[in-house]
Amino acid sequence: MTVFTCSNCGAAVTAVLREIPFVDEPAVHHGSGPAPSRMPPGAFARDPDRFEQPSEPTSENQTLLVPAGPALTIVVHPGDIRGLSLHPDRRRLNGCCRLDGCDGPNLVCAGCGAEIATEQSDCWVSWHDVRLDPAAVVEHRPNSEQL
Ligand SMILES: [Zn+2]
């Protein structure tokens, strides 16, 4: 079991999670409202691919990919994040009705303000996920696991 903490100040930023394999399933969400998370509660997975998302389609470009984060982002269920706040820069908080996550990290450590994660929860994204920047967090394994 693993808890992720802020690499800057040490505050916990997730619940206690277990690692599961990353499954890159095709999108299942086509309606309005938030998409489901690809992560079950209590789990995390590392996305082996660089985090890219289609931008909001325009008439000129329906499939533009935007680099929105690093490789090996740690994908968690939105309900499992702890101690994170919305980014103070409103330019990071774009979205149609929630957060599209296409402008860089949009969640910061509530304790120290470090950029920690990117939430995608807008109506048009495929999955409602939170991705931790692997360089912004530290993995801790609670001692009870070793007993
Ligand atoms: Zn912090």
Image (tube, rainbow, N blue to C red):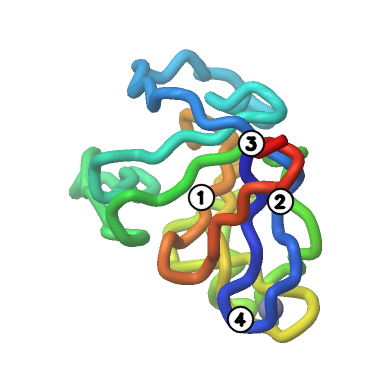
- Which residue lies under the disc numbered 1? 131
Q: In which quarter of the image is residue 67?
A: bottom left
Pair 4/3: label in front = 3
Q: Residues within 10 Å of mark 2 (few under 14, many from 20)?
A: many
Q: Nearer the viewer, residue 26 or 138?
A: 138
- Establish whether ligand 1 lies closer than 8 Å to the Cβ of label 4: yes
Q: How crowded is mark 1: few (under 14 residues within 10 Å), some or many (20 or more)?
A: many
Residue 14's disc number: 2
Q: What residue type is labelled 3?
A: Met
Q: Residues within 10 Å of mark 3 (few under 14, many from 20)?
A: some
Distance from Cα at disc 3 to Cα at disc 1: 18 Å
Of the numbered discs 4 and 3, the one sitting upstream in the chain is 3
Q: Are marks 2 and 3 in contact (CB under 8 Å)?
A: no
Q: What residue type is labelled 1?
A: Arg
Q: Which amino acid does label 4 sit on?
A: Ala
Distance from Cα at disc 2 to Cα at disc 4: 15 Å
Of the numbered discs 2 and 3, the one sitting upstream in the chain is 3
Give percent across and percent down for residue 63: 22, 40
Of the numbered discs 3 and 1, the one sitting upstream in the chain is 3
120 lies left or right of 48 = right
- Which residue lies under the disc numbered 3? 1
Q: In which of the image's four quarters is ligand 1 placed?
A: bottom right
- Which residue lies under the disc numbered 4? 114
Quadrant for the C terminus in the image: top right
